Image: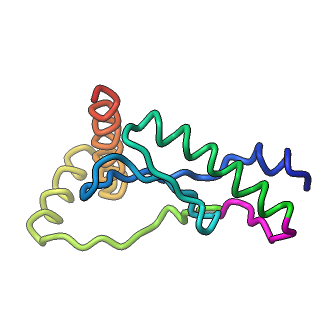
Amino acid sequence: MTLEEYLKIPYKMEIVEDTEEGGYVASFPDLKGCITCAGTLEDVVRNAEDAKRAWLEAAFEDGYHIPLPAEEKYSGQFKFRMPKSLHRSLAEHAKAEGISMNQYCIYLLSMNDALHKNVNATK
């Protein structure tokens, strides 16, 4: 791959607030050691893009292996433990709706997830 091709790859950027010193820290988990900080979100995103470019340029020039972004895979399944009373309540509500408890839980989780996205979008 060419350097320009690597620069076009959408590497995952993680941003966390620096609660001790203020500002924000940005990193790219797939690009080990590629990290930067800034006082505002706008600045940390801009700095992160500059840091990613510099990291990729240096790695490319030095012949260092540049990893591709890790793919996250989800099976669609997970185990979930709950109180027996909640299990009973969910099963009863699902039965009243004429659907399986699995379908009912997916409905509830989807509705809550949509609500959570809308609340965060307005912040």
The residue under the point 54% across, 65% down is 75
Q: State the image coordinates of residue 13 (x, y, percent, origin top left).
A: 54, 51
For the N terminus, the quadrant is: bottom right
As drawn, the residue found furthest toward the left would be: 85
The residue under the point 27% across, 32% down is 119
121 above or below 20?
above
Instruction: Tell me if 116 is positioned left or right of 45 in this view.
Output: left
The residue nearer to you, when weighing 67 against 63, is: 63
The residue nearer to you, when weighing 59 against 71, is: 59
Number of marks drawn: 0
As drawn, the residue found furthest toward the right would be: 1
Q: State the image coordinates of residue 123 (x, y, percent, origin top left).
A: 27, 29
Colour treatment of the image? rainbow
Instruction: Tell me if 15 is positioned left or right of 53 in this view.
Output: left
The residue nearer to you, when weighing 3 against 119, is: 3
The residue under the point 28% across, 46% down is 108
Quarter of the image for residue 34 reads: bottom right
As drawn, the residue found furthest toward the top would be: 122
Does the magenta segment cover residue 63? Answer: yes
The residue nearer to you, when weighing 33 against 122, is: 33
Q: State the image coordinates of residue 59 (x, y, percent, origin top left).
A: 78, 64
- Secondary structure mostly seen in magenta is loop
Does the magenta segment cover residue 118? Answer: no
Highlighted range, magenta: 62-70
Instruction: Tell me if 36 is positioned left or right of 8 in this view.
Output: left
55 above or below 46?
below
Q: State the image coordinates of residue 107 (x, y, percent, origin top left).
A: 33, 45
79 above or below 15?
below
